[in-house]
Structure formats: C-alpha cells, structure tokens
Amino acid sequence: MGKMKELQIETHNLDRDWQDLLLRILAQEDVGLAAATRPDEEPADEEEWELYRSLPDLTFTPKETVRKLAVEFKMFRWQKDWQRHVRDAISHIHGIVRTEGFDGGIVIVSLDISDQALAELKSTAAPEVQIWGLGTLRSLAEKDDALADALEALVSETVLDGDSGIRGNVDTQSPTGWKLASRLRQIPAGKEGWSDFEKYCEQAIRFLFAAELSNLSSQQRTDDKLNRMDLIGRIKSDRGSFWSMIAADFSSRYIVFDAKNYHEPIGQAEIQITEKYLFSKGLRTVAILVARSGADESARKSAETILRENGKFILVINLDDLCHMLTGADAGDPPENRLFERMDEMLMKMGR
C-alpha cells in the first residue's frame, strides 16, 4: 500500500485536536475569550443539520473589546485547490455573521499563506471576515512554549504533501452542496428512487471532485456489454493531492464511482459486482461505492479479500458521508478529508 498503509492519523480526531488547540490559543489571558459552539455528535437528521451548519466552530471575543466573532477552522491535508475551498468558507461564515448577529468572522486555515494570497482572498463582499493562516497562529502562541510546540506538532501531522508555502490565484464557485445533500436525503430508498439517486450522486461527485478528476463520464458500458459503471474519471497528474496519492499507492489512473440506493446495507454480492468494473492492466483498480445504508460485515470482508488478493481497492461510503462532504464543501471543508478518514479506517483494521 506504500505510504497509505503507514498513515496512522484519523482525520476526524486530528480536526478535534486542532479545535482544542485553537481554543487554548484564543483563550489565553492576553488574547481573549473563546468557546466551542457545536456538539460532539454529528446531526442525526436534516433539521439538526440545518441548525448545525448555522453555528461556527468557535466564538471569540478579542481582549479589551466587546466584539463577538464567529470562527471557522479549515484543515487541509493537501494543498490542491485550497483557494476555492477558502473562498467558500468566507461566503459561509459571512452568512453566519449576517444571520446570527455576530460582529464579524474569522476563517482560520491550517496552512502558511503568503501576503499576496491573503490579499487575493480578502472579499469586498464580506469585509467583516478575516483570514488567518499559520503565521497569525504562531504569533499568538509564541509566548507559550507548550502551545507553540503543540502547534508545530499538529502542522507536521496535518500536511501530507510536504510543502506549506501557499500562493496562486483564487477560483470561485457557487456553493450548491447543501441543495444536493437535501435532494439526496429526500429520495426514497429502494427501486422507487434508484434512478434519481444515481443521478444526484453523479451530480454530487462532479460538484465535489471535478477539479481533481478529468473526463468524468457516466453510464459507460464495458466491452463485453455485461457491466455498467455509473461514473468513471481520470485522476489528474497533479502532485501533492489525495488523488495523486491514490494513483501512486494503488497503481490506478482511473477511478470508478457506483451508487446503490438499497434500504439495507449492501453485502458481498454488490462488492463483487463492483469489482467487475476494475481492471489492473487497464490502470483501473479503485472504486468508490456510494451505498445509501452503508455495507454489512460480509461486504467489508469481501472488499478486504479483493484488495489483499487482487490489489483492487473498493471503498464504501454511505449517504451520510456523501452529504457531510457536500455540506462541508459549501463551508470550505475539503471533501477528501472524509474519504481519507474512511480509507484509513478500512486499511488499519485490515488483517493479513
């Protein structure tokens, strides 16, 4: 598995470590007052999602002021296309400031950002939103050796492409992830909704990963006319991204996406069907299967066996995972974080 098997970081826990450290940094006596706002548990339904997304990660009142600021933290494991995600985060927190009565907002990014890039990111449409990179955090933590050391340790654990120097132009994209997630949740499970589920899963994949995967093509039939792939795309050759790591570790140039709208978790049979779409000599060895209700134990064991014996990697995510990535993308969260977390879980539990 190369580097992928050696990675022992669970992204969700790493994000929590960042949140805890930010609280400690912002709550220093000479910095201000800070508090967490969101519950530890993720939302259970759409109503809770709506409430959840209207809350910032933290609240912060700088010392000697009465200004209450909303704070959003964005953790980047790879630096590909980071500007687009930060632009979405600025738009998201601007909405929170406007609707929830905050005096301003801060987007904190787990990367070094040049002055030029910061100037490009500053939005005239959201003048009350500040953008902080690692330079600002380091200046706030420098008086406390323990905080400064903890910050550098987290930075070294977080960035996986080994280069924290950031520059480049900013792309813009209208956030529609929340709308796609809401539509997906409304589709009935089973045969009644299978066509719509496939259609909106395809839209979701294009929304999330069109910048990283080229030539995304739907409903491609294999030459023997027996198997149909819902969506296939070519991994771009850019280095230093989640997808380039996938390409290197699994010797794959292409990635297949499949969607299953079943009431119950998928089983071994669905994994074996998806395997038929994969072909090592065709550099097509990776598939992501969106199973509405997830996978059962037989599916998990089948995927492990296929990987162990044939080198083909099939990753199953459920509807909650996909919706988490969609709503998070609107707020500037890199969607590959959730994929990496699910992949890490599978590989770390896998036996010989």
Image (spheres, grey):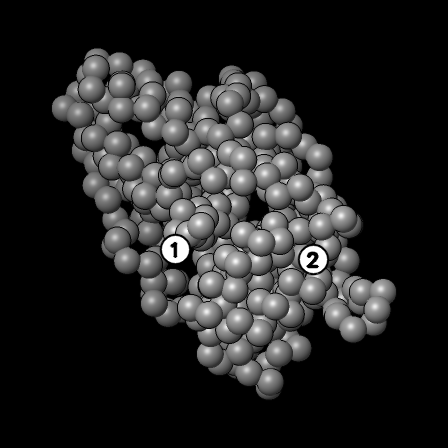
Q: Amino acid at mark 2?
A: Leu
Let me know if residue 124 appears in the view.
Answer: no
Q: How many numbered tags mark residues here?
A: 2
Q: Residue at x 73, y 47 (%)?
A: 283
Horizontal and vertical percent for residue 7? 43, 37
Whether 159 is drawn above or below 54: the answer is above
Q: What's under tag 1, amino acid-wise?
A: Arg
Label 1 crowd (10 A; few <14 / some 14-19 / many >=20): some
Q: CA distance from mark 1 to mark 2?
A: 37 Å
Which of the two labelled residues, at mark 1 and mark 2, occupies the earlier sequence position? 1
The percent coordinates of residue 9 (x first, y second) are 38, 39
Comparing 125 with 132, the one in front is: 132
Determine the secondary structure under disc 1.
helix
Residue 315: name its quadrant.
bottom right
| Extreme residue in the bottom direction | 192
Q: Secondary structure at mark 2?
A: loop
Mark identifier at residue 53: 1
Q: Nearer the viewer, residue 235 or 85?
A: 235
* Residue 26: mark: none
Residue on which disc 2 sits: 278
From the viewer's perspective, tell me whether residue 193 is left or right of residue 53.
right
At horizontal 60% and vertical 85% (from top left) the residue drawn is: 191
Relative to 188, 69 lies left or right: left
